[in-house]
Image (cartoon, rainbow, N blue to C red):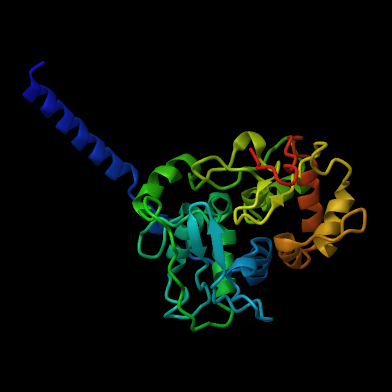
Amino acid sequence: MRFSTWLKAVVLLAIAGAVAGFVLTMPSGIPADALAPRTADLANGATMFNIGGCASCHATPHQDDLTKLGGGLALATPFGTFRVPNISPDQTHGIGAWSELEFVSAMKKGIGEDGEHLYPAFPYPSYQHMKLDDVRDLFAFIRTLPPVATPSQPHDIPFPFSVRRGLGLWQLLYVDGKAFVPDTSKDAVWNRGAYLVEGPGHCAECHSPRNVIGGIDADRRFAGGPDAEGKGWVPNITPSPDGIPNYSVKDIAYLLETGFTPDLDSVGGSMADVVKNTSKLTAADRQAIATYIKSLPPRPGKAPSKGKKAD
């Protein structure tokens, strides 16, 4: 092959690759016709707010009123530092000017107000499994909360992670926007628990190890792993010897209500914040969550010994 012919082939392949990359990474939100007119259920929106842990991340740090969602929490990760945004109903600094469609696209597709890819520090890979009406109820509930006039702070993300368009490739692997599908072989309690854990509760986002590109390791889902912020180890919550094999459904439900483990210890760290939210759920929902967690397949995931790094 002559050099000029070879060069032309390389250039054509490069152009084709660039076009394919451009198309594959193009942000795509929820179509407008997906949202039929309806009346929001604010009580259900409050439930989604609590199980979703919205206040745990988005409430302004060091304040007593957890309904003031001014953001500001900094999440230091191997990919950079993410700063949690203001999602209060403030028209200028929060999401008060967002449409319902924009909110649904953020939750279900990881697409922001301006059509940009959102970083998965916001756990939309789990939120995408929520029922559309639950997302809409959550939006309606957030709009009832007090506006906070605090500007969101920019993320501190190094190159190449700072190029948001590249997240489109990541989303091809981890985001399909599909809602949770009940398992017809299981009862209503189990399915409710599965939905809350895998969808709005996004439990796997913290309790699972991740691969080099930040995706959850499917083979070790719920088996614990290094804390994303480098603050220790998030425990295994499967019934393996490394996890919680001796916890009963009743034990798990009680922990979600009170924060106390079966041996009368109490949870700390970010799990203590989770319990502040799960304690507001109905007893039936805590029972459902516990039922599903108790049914998880056992997977090894022991925390490394002191001084040793996790694999």
Which residue occupies the foreground of this view, 298 or 153? 153
Q: Identify whether 225 is placed above or below 39.
A: above
Residue 104 point in image, percent of width and height: 48, 60
Quadrant containing the N terminus is top left
Q: Identify whether 83 is placed above or below 160.
A: below
Residue 306 point in image, percent of width and height: 74, 46
Residue 183 in view (yes/no): yes
Residue shown at the point (58%, 43%) measured from the top left: 210
Q: Identify whether 73 is placed above or below 125.
A: below
Residue 27 in view (yes/no): no
On screen, residue 124 versus residue 279, left or right, reads left
Residue 281 point in image, percent of width and height: 76, 64
Q: How many numbered dots are placed on residues in this image?
A: 0
Residue shown at the point (15%, 33%) measured from the top left: 11
Residue shown at the point (88%, 46%) measured from the top left: 248
On screen, residue 50 versus residue 279, left or right, reads left
In the rendered image, which quarter is residue 153 located in? Answer: bottom left
Residue shown at the point (75%, 68%) measured from the top left: 276
